[in-house]
Amino acid sequence: MDVKTAFRTKQMLAVPLKMRGEIIGVLQAMNKPGGFLQKDLDAMRAFSSILALALSHALLVKELAACKA
């Protein structure tokens, strides 16, 4: 992907977005100046739970809207 986008990935941190045990997406960060630390991973894991919940609710609202149409 770096070749297609002309972006150079030096480092990457990724955590799954899980809802009820199912992976519904991935949260990813790249190229942090100075590198990633354990606290970055901990913060991403905490944020991924909130993000997964918000994404799950947004998908549910979209499904409900489609049923009404």
Image (tube, rainbow, N blue to C red):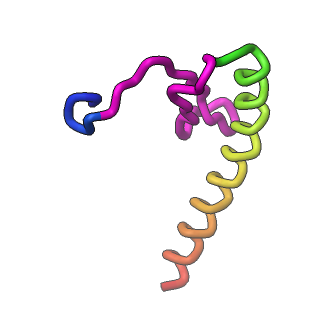
The quadrant holding residue 26 is top right
Give the camera-side residue of 60 and 2: 2
Q: Residue at x 72, y 48 (%)?
A: 53
Q: Residue furthest left?
A: 4
Quadrant housing the N terminus = top left
Residue 39 percent location from the top left of the image: 79, 20
- Number of marks in the rendered image: 0
Quick check: 64 above or below 38? below
| Drawn side of residue 46 relative to residue 11, left or right | right
Q: Residue 24 in the image: x percent, y percent?
A: 55, 40
Q: State the image quarter where residue 61 is shown.
A: bottom right
- Looking at the rendering, the stretch of residues picked out in magenta corresponds to 7-35
Please indicate whether residue 15 sits to the left or right of residue 69 in the image: right
- Residue at left 35%, top 26%? 8
Report x, y in % for residue 63: 54, 67
Residue furthest to the bottom in view is 69
Q: Is 57 situated above or below 43? A: below
Task: Choose top left, top right, bottom left or bottom right for residue 47.
Answer: top right
Lateral position of residue 46 relative to residue 36, left or right:
right
Camera-side residue: 44 or 56?
Answer: 44
Q: Position of residue 54 (x, y in %)?
A: 69, 54
Judge whether residue 23 is colored magenta: yes
